[in-house]
């Protein structure tokens, strides 16, 4: 096995330019101290925000200035740490930055409650007194909208103190399943005894050896089954906490309490569930193709992840990946592509795996810095797609930072994955248009199908589970292990049962999903991929006007509510249309894939 090159041996142009943030650690230290020393200055505004528009404006400006500086201090520390997680001095830098973040959070915690206390008349007056306050109009509107769900200062203070107890279920869950669970061992493809872990589980499910898949599946769920009383009780408590939070703030349901702060109408949720349900026969068709291609009489739950087409063994060196991604995104216009290429050349990206480097891939940076991307580039198609995905995030941040003032320079999860998945879709369209190599075409289409199955279908099934558990608990039913298992099993029968043997063990899968401790979160993965599918289709079919709308969306940050931002780009998530369009695209891909699979046999 080839050992990894050390960081110092990697050509500078393949390492991100963190020195552009702070040339030396002494410069970082200077900013760190500046933030720490400015905290009392922010706290000095406590109790005074109702005095005048001028005071309110100065306080918000002060907060922004601190946040800006803090973000820069924070991203530098976390990216330095991720370069080599075994480097203790950088670990210390990171720990200090995190500590300062929470101090800043505590120092600023009076601001929102004091704004909510203002009457509408008073706030209107403030805008007249201090015209510069206009900058914060939308941000203040968002806070004021939550007024009806905000309690008296005294109650709010008590509620704030319940936070640690309310996050108990999630902490207990993590401790139990991450720290305490031991799943035991199985025999791998070479008959060696290997331990089943969270991390390895999915790679065992991708094994071409069915015995390995089945053993991993049975071994993993045996542990969840053994602790099902505890797991159910921890989850039921978490649902009760969601319901408590919604009730004390006067929401009609826990679903409403989760969607309303982002101004997402409840129909977005119900449309998603209904539309996906209506299209389940298409999923079943895909499963039928899967069963045939794997040569199985029965498709089991442990047969869902094994790849149908081996990764086309073409090696794609990094330079070639960059060139292909740049060409693949040509549809987004000359400016987009040029600015992206310039970014890549000015060392946005930390390309290669080095000893101790953080695994995976992400996009980061702050308002005052260039975008940064961490990769662990492998010379293959997946690596190239990861590059296109992360560049989507980075270009979104790049355009937003360039066009929005700081208060609107971030974005919520509801829109966060749109730019990245749009890039992937455009790359796929480009590659399919380029190649006649049928193995490559099949690989690309299958990757697309799997992305839709695991994101659009699977996450919607999760969303349906959460909807059902909260609804039943709100109606006073007890969430016993039997009830939770049967709700989840039924959902699997509905989603997969027509073509799959729904093994008993899958009833416990709900207890393996950490996202359920963040209620009504996962549906945004499904709406995100739907919006991206609709937008990329418009970009491909309509050209310039669609590109223009899309770029406007990338430039808009959080200056509007998420559904309004997407409407501006050309997708109305309050109707079932985008989800249906995404599912139509899935159906087309299933057709293509089915035909190709019949030809190659
Ligand atoms: Zn992403």
Image: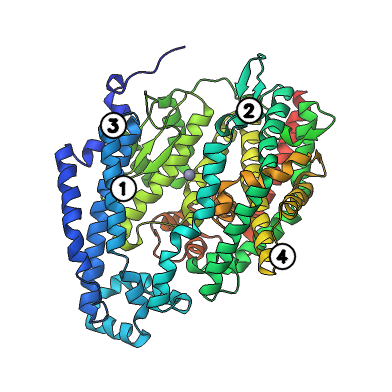
Q: Are marks 2 and 3 in contact (CB under 8 Å)?
A: no
Is label 1 or label 2 in front?
2
Query: Which image quarter: residue 473?
Result: bottom right
Q: Nearer the viewer, residue 171 or 400?
A: 171
Disc number placed over residue 69 in the picture, else none: none
Which residue lies under the disc numbered 4?
477
**Numbered circle sitting on residue 184:** 2
CA gap between label 1 and label 2 equals 36 Å
Are there few (<14), some (14-19), or many (20+) residues within 10 Å of tag 3? few
Q: Is residue 184 left or right of residue 498?
A: left
Marks 1/4: CA–CA distance:
41 Å
SS state under label 2: loop
Around disc 2, counting alpha carbons within 10 Å, would you say few (fewer than 14), some (14 to 19), or many (20 or more)?
some
- Tell me residue 373's x, y (percent): 37, 38
Mark 1 or mark 4, earlier in chain: 1
Where disc 3 sits, the SS reads helix
The residue that label 1 is drawn on is 98
Res 347 visible: no
Q: Nearer the viewer, residue 89 or 51?
A: 89
Name the residue carrying label 3: 88
Q: CA distance from mark 4 to mark 2?
A: 35 Å
Local packing at callout 1 (Cα closer than 10 Å; few below 14, some 14-19, many 20+) is some
Of callouts 4 and 2, the N-terminal one: 2
């Amino acid at each position: 096995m080839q050992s990894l090159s050390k960081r110092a041996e990697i050509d500078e142009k393949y390492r991100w330019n963190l020195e552009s943030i702070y040339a030396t650690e002494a410069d970082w230290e200077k900013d760190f101290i500046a933030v720490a020393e400015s905290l009392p200055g922010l706290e000095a505004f406590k109790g005074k925000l109702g005095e005048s528009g001028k005071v309110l404006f100065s306080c918000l400006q002060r907060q922004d200035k601190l946040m800006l500086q803090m973000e820069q201090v924070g991203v530098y520390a976390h990216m330095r740490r991720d370069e080599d997680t075994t480097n203790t001095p950088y670990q210390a830098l990171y720990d200090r930055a995190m500590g300062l973040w929470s101090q800043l959070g505590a120092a600023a915690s009076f601001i929102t409650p004091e704004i909510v206390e203002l009457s509408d008349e008073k706030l209107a007056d403030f805008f007249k007194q201090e015209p510069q306050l206009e900058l914060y109009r939308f941000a203040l509107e968002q806070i004021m909208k939550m007024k009806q769900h905000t309690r008296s200062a005294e109650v709010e203070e008590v509620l704030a103190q319940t936070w640690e107890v309310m996050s108990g279920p999630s902490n207990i869950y993590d401790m139990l399943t991450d720290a305490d669970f031991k799943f035991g061992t199985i025999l791998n493809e070479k008959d060696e005894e290997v331990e089943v872990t969270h991390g390895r589980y999915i790679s065992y499910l991708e094994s071409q050896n069915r015995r390995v898949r089945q053993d991993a599946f049975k071994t993993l769920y045996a542990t969840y089954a053994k602790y099902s009383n505890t797991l159910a009780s921890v989850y039921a408590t978490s649902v009760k906490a969601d319901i408590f939070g919604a009730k004390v703030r006067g929401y009609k349901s826990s679903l409403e309490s989760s969607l309303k702060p982002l101004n997402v109408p409840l129909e977005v949720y119900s449309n998603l569930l209904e539309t996906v349900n209506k299209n389940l026969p298409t999923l079943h068709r895909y499963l039928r193709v899967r069963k045939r291609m794997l040569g199985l009489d029965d498709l089991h739950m442990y047969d869902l992840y094994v790849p149908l087409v081996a990764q086309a063994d073409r090696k794609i060196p990094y330079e070639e990946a960059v060139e292909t991604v740049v060409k693949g995104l040509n549809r987004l216009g000359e400016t987009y592509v040029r600015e992206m290429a310039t970014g890549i050349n000015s060392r946005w990206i930390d390309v290669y795996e080095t000893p101790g480097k953080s695994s995976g891939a992400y996009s980061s940076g702050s308002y005052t810095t260039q975008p940064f991307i961490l990769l662990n580039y492998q010379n293959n198609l997946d690596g190239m797609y990861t590059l296109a995905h992360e560049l989507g995030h980075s270009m979104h941040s790049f355009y937003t930072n360039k066009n929005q003032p700081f208060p609107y320079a971030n974005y919520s999860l509801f829109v966060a994955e749109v730019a990245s998945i749009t890039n992937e879709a455009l790359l796929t369209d480009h590659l399919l248009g380029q190649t006649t190599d049928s193995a490559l075409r099949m690989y690309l289409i299958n990757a697309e199908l799997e992305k839709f199955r695991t994101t659009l279908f699977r996450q919607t099934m999760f969303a349906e589970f959460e909807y059902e558990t909260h609804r039943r608990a709100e109606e006073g039913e007890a969430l016993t292990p039997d009830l939770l298992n049967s709700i989840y099993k039924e959902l699997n029968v509905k989603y997969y049962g027509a073509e799959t043997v729904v093994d008993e063990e899958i009833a416990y899968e709900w207890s393996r999903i950490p996202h359920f401790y963040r209620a009504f979160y996962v549906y945004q993965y499904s709406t995100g991929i739907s919006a991206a599918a609709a937008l990329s289709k418009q970009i491909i079919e309509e050209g310039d006007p669609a590109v223009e709308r899309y770029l406007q969306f990338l430039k808009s940050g959080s200056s509007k509510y998420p559904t309004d931002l997407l409407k501006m780009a050309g997708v109305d998530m309050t109707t079932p249309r985008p989800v249906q369009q995404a599912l139509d695209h899935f159906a087309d891909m299933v057709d293509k894939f089915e035909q190709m699979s019949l030809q190659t046999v």
